[in-house]
Amino acid sequence: MLALSIFLEINPSTFRNYLIFLGIYYLLLFMYMLFKRSTEYRITETGISIRRLRRQEISANYENFENLSYAQGFLARRFRCGTIYVELKKGKGTHTATTGKSLYILRDVPNPIDLYSELLSRVGTYVPSNLGTGSDAPPAPSPG
């Protein structure tokens, strides 16, 4: 942010506006960071549960998993995070795929390949129809 400041004409008459701009920028950045850290994923013996800021906890059992996949783009690989998509056989997830199925989307998961492998091992006899490839082609959620 400060690197871009060298291109601005800051003088005594515009300094107050510049400080207001900086304050708003850092406030929005802080709110985004708070939002990203407010989501909690837990892997249990029976399934996964998701808890978000000011929302009740939702969960799914491993028996209800129909499909698992993960995506990890260039920047996500650089920061060692990614997204895991869990398609459900029945029930309501956090999102709806374009196929009409319910999904749980676990975003910004550290080391998603490890968690993906752990979920596959916990599901047991489950044979996924769409193995995660690490590409950016997950089941697309529809708006809503």
Image (cartoon, grey):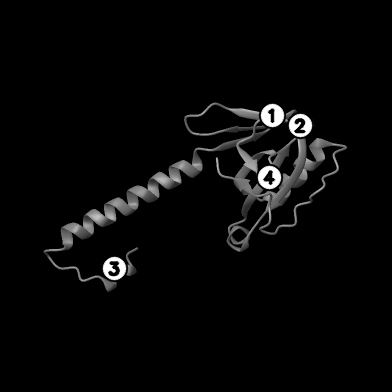
The answer to whether one can see residue 10 in this image is yes
Q: Do residues under tags 1 and 2 come within 8 Å of each other at their CB atoms?
A: yes
- How many neighbours does mark 3 have within 10 angstroms: few (below 14), some (14-19), or many (20 or more)? few
Give residue 5's mark.
3
- The quarter of the picture where the C terminus appears is top right
The answer to which of marks 2 and 3 sits earlier in the sequence is 3
Give the residue number, with chain letter if any, for mark 2. 64
Which is more toward the observer, 144 or 108?
A: 144
- As measured in the structure, the alpha-carbon distance from the residue carrying label 2 to the one carrying label 3 is 52 Å
Instruction: Please tell me which residue is depicted at 35% across the width and 63% down the height of the picture.
Output: 1
- How many neighbours does mark 2 have within 10 angstroms: few (below 14), some (14-19), or many (20 or more)? some
Q: Do residues under tags 4 and 1 come within 8 Å of each other at their CB atoms?
A: no
Looking at the rendered structure, the kind of residue marked 4 is Tyr
Where does residue 44 sit, x and y in percent of width and height?
Answer: 70, 30
Give residue 85's mark.
4
The answer to which of marks 2 and 4 sits earlier in the sequence is 2
Q: Secondary structure at mark 2?
A: helix
Q: Residue furthest right?
A: 125
- As measured in the structure, the alpha-carbon distance from the residue carrying label 4 to the one carrying label 3 is 40 Å
